[in-house]
Image (cartoon, rainbow, N blue to C red):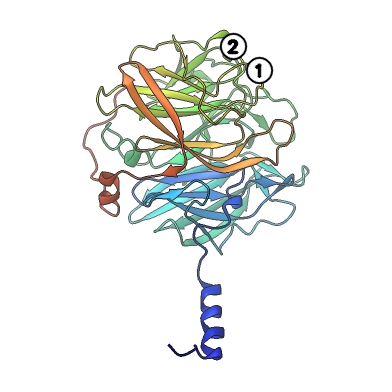
Amino acid sequence: MSAMNPLAVILLAAILALLPAQGTSAQTLYPRAARVYLPRLRRLLSFGGIVNRQPQDVVVSLDLSKEWPTSNPLLTPLSTTLGMSAATRAQDMIPVVARNGDSYDIMLYGGMTSDASRGPKRYMLSTKDGVTLENVRSVDLGAQEYTAMIPTMSSVAIVLDEYFKDRGAVGNAPSYIVGGRPFGNASARATATVASLNFDKPANAFPPALRQAGPNSTEYSGLVYVTPSQLMIAGGSQRAWTYDLLRMEWRDYKGMFPPQASARSKNQLVTYTAPTSGRTYVISVGTDYTGPAGLFFYTDTSTQSNFTDAGPIQGFDVVMFFHSVFMVDDQLVAVGVTTDISNAEQFEPVLVFKVSESSPGTLAITKTDKFIPSAASATQLGRKIHQLHHRPTLD
């Protein structure tokens, strides 16, 4: 075989340098980033985050349609960013997503800026494939807009009628936030407001007369959609609460955490529905508490059982916080996971845990070193999700 022409080698190297990186730069899945999961596209978009105590202006797309090892996740770092200035780069932004025809509209709201004297912004953009960003723009948040900082919120915004495609979800759903402190106010519990954030209606706080007083929201509590019309909040105590989105009412959740799990600061919540029994579980993932509490607790929402410690995870005994979690089939995916309470820069870009129901009411959670999409989900990639024609009902 003859040697390749030197000019051809140079040209090939130049072409390869221009191609998007795949399976590299995993460290750009930073803690405290805003994430958006697009089930139909099998993509997770990650915006920003923090490293070396500095918020970052990076965007990466994680491919969830193919198999990859957790040591080398299949990432595409995007050349398009939010265009944050050094002073207005933000962490802990609130993500919102809405499907708009064959495209997705995304909003990233508020957060804590690098310069504490500079107020947060609202960033907006669109994507059709979860890789290419279009129409990226930003506006300053007005003085009258809701600008809660570090509220209780879901760690990942999800297109709910795709995620709950068999549960009666119809159309787009807002992202909900509870409490937090307004910009310029140092009190962590300065407001008990429950707010819904939509792409086209950036801040719509429920009038106090139309809702019951809720729990005292602690910073970094977990929040998740249990059904299309019900939220759950948990963190900072042994209790959990649900929020009825049809009646705008708080309800005490019967199940409680055991005493050793009393400190659930910086936990995140995720739901898992067992395919055999049909039961829906809420799983509390992580904490920055270094005591004897476990990392995974779960409750069976059909019986409102007490939260059960999933037990030690073999080969994994560190803390987990400042992370995001979401379910893909039977795999719990955690990204941007801080793993050292004394060093916030020590983090894992991606961790994957297999979830299964060993018997009705009992879950088994094991750590795995690979993400493997189910064959059924892989064949559905690119198909349209048909809208269901009945309204959601409260479970």
According to the picture, the residue beneath numbered tag 2 turns out to be: 260
**Which label is found at residue 291?**
1
Residue 126 in percent (x, y) is at 46, 56
**Which label is found at residue 192?**
none
* Cβ–Cβ under 8 Å for marks 2 and 1: yes
Left or right: 229 in relation to 5: left
* Kind of residue indicated by mark 2: Gln
Compared to 22, does 285 lie above or below?
above
Task: First in sequence, mark 2 or 1: give its number.
Answer: 2
Picture residue at 61% right of the left edge, 35% below the top: 322
Residue 122 in percent (x, y) is at 59, 48
Residue 358 in percent (x, y) is at 33, 21
Left or right: 387 in relation to 142: left
Name, please, the residue furthest toward the left: 389
Residue closer to the observer: 271 or 243:
271
Which quadrant is the C terminus positioned in?
top left
Residue 395 visible in image: no
